[in-house]
Image (tube, rainbow, N blue to C red):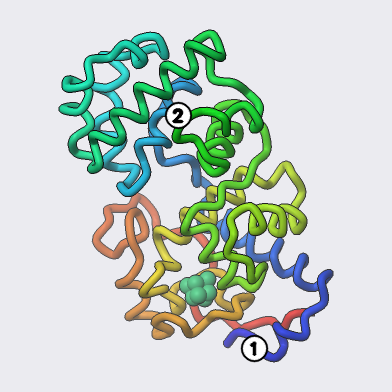
Amino acid sequence: MPASPAAYAAESPVARTRRARKIYRALVDRYPYAHAELDFETPLQLLVATVLSAQTTDVTVNKVTPILFSRWPTAQALAAADRVSMEEVLKPTGFFRAKTNSVITLGQALVERFDGEVPRRLKDLVTLPGVGRKTANVVLGNAFDVPGITVDTHFGRLARRFGWTEETDPVKVEHEIGALFPRKDWVMLSHVLIFHGRRTCHARKPACGACPVARWCPSYGEGETDPVKALTLLKYELAPSAVLPDPPPGPLPGERAEEPA
Ligand code: SF4
């Protein structure tokens, strides 16, 4: 069983940092293959795919982007695209008229202000239409190897469940969590939290009984704690129905809890 809520409430900043890093290492063990789940080959492709991923899944975006990028491979081509033709391609992603508009205006802004190239600085990226801090950090971390923390819905939810922050504002979450980890870990930290949120620590039904970080989690018990029932809640490659070459990596659920230091 994990520690009591009172023990977490009394946790010192140093103990919290130590506990945060244990959680991080356990998640890297569980998801050593964690990565950006949007398919891309260039910074432009990642930028556009991330803009398209609003209100839909990465799987859906990955289905349309090969056609999108083969028809409009550059910022110049996106800027000059025929709106109706692009809407047809983007239809499966939902909100396709607004997304078509975003992609075309994004292409135009890149051509007009950055010679058709994706800028490498956060302060430039966030001036582009439809590009917020989250999208900018995805592009910086994954296309340019610049450390950044991507606070999406999964990251924010898990950071609060872990007791790493109480903030709900993504920028505050980013800064507070950034202080707990070295910069070199920021990109992988974003990947493993998002992987964990999608596969195990779901918004409505977290699979606490099959969670490798349960022993350090103040929110243990928000979801199913029975190990057998919890396994049925896992998703994607960890789902019981998934065809796996090996059993899922990581510690077995139900191991003895450690009190925070
Ligand atoms: S699944 Fe449960 S124990 Fe695991 S991180 Fe989420 S709330 Fe905590």
> Is residue 83 visible from the viewing direction of this image?
yes
Task: Tell me residue 14's x, y (percent).
Answer: 84, 69
Task: Tell me residue 101's x, y (percent).
Answer: 31, 28
* Residue to which mark 1 is pinned: 5
Residue name at image x 71 percent, y 53 percent:
175
Residue name at image x 41 percent, y 74 percent:
207
Residue 66 placement: quadrant: top left
Rendered-image quadrant of the C terminus: bottom right
Q: Secondary structure at mark 1?
A: helix
For marks 2 and 1, give the CA distance. Answer: 40 Å
Q: Amino acid at mark 1?
A: Pro
Q: Relative to 223, say whether 143 is above or below.
A: above
82 on left or right of 230: left
Rendered-image quadrant of the N terminus: bottom right
193 on left or right of 61: right
Residue name at image x 49 percent, y 42 percent:
35
Task: Tell me residue 4's x, y (percent).
Answer: 64, 90
* Residue to which mark 2 is pinned: 46
